[in-house]
Image (cartoon, helix red, strand yellow):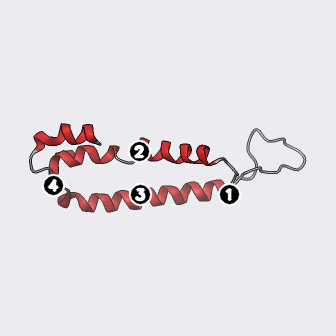
């Protein structure tokens, strides 16, 4: 039923609800990871050291490949379906999709 709304201005409240839900889920996962004591696969006895790396030293090409794979895979995909509803002439949608 919500997918049948043709104008983005009428569903802007839905975007705010989605933003709040995404932020709440990120906060929940962050707290859960921080509260976790020892993974199940870690040794039961002795000292366990988490070897997390916040930063690393990749080469420029490896870093750009990692960033571009995320950006190119997910950046424009959600916008494709809402663009056709807002276009003045929807017949141009295929051409703009191919250019993108």
Residue that protrudes farthest toward the right in the picture: 46
- For numbered disc 1, what is the local secondary structure? helix
Q: Is the residue under label 4 in contact with that under label 3 (CB below 8 Å)?
A: no
Residue 83 can be seen in this image: yes
Q: In which quarter of the image is residue 12?
A: bottom left
- For numbered disc 4, what is the local secondary structure? loop
Residue 27 place in picture, x, y as percent: 53, 60
Q: Mark 2 points at which residue?
A: 74
Q: Residue at x 90, y 47 (%)?
A: 46
Residues under labels 4 and 2: Cα distance?
A: 23 Å
> Camera-side residue: 66 or 10?
66
Residue 38 place in picture, x, y as percent: 76, 48
User: Upstream in the sequence, badge 1 or badge 3?
Assistant: 3
User: Upstream in the sequence, badge 1 or badge 2?
Assistant: 1
Residue that protrudes farthest toward the front in the picture: 60
Image position of 96 (left or right of 71): left
Residues under labels 1 and 4: Cα distance?
A: 43 Å
Q: Mark 3 or mark 4, which is nearer to you?
A: 4
Residues under labels 1 and 3: Cα distance?
A: 21 Å
Q: Name the residue under label 3.
A: 21
The image's mark for residue 35 is 1
Q: Residue at x 47, y 60 (%)?
A: 24
Residue 95 place in picture, x, y as percent: 19, 38
């Amino acid at each position: 039923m919500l997918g049948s709304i043709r104008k983005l201005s009428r569903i802007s409240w839905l975007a705010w609800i989605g933003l709040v839900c995404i932020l709440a889920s990120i906060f929940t996962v962050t707290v859960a990871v921080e509260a976790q004591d020892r993974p199940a696969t870690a040794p039961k006895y002795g000292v366990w050291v988490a070897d997390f790396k916040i930063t690393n030293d990749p080469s420029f090409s490896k870093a750009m490949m990692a960033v571009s794979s995320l950006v190119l895979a997910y950046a424009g995909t959600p916008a494709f379906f809402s663009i056709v509803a807002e276009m003045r002439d929807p017949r141009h949608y295929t051409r703009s999709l191919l250019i993108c």
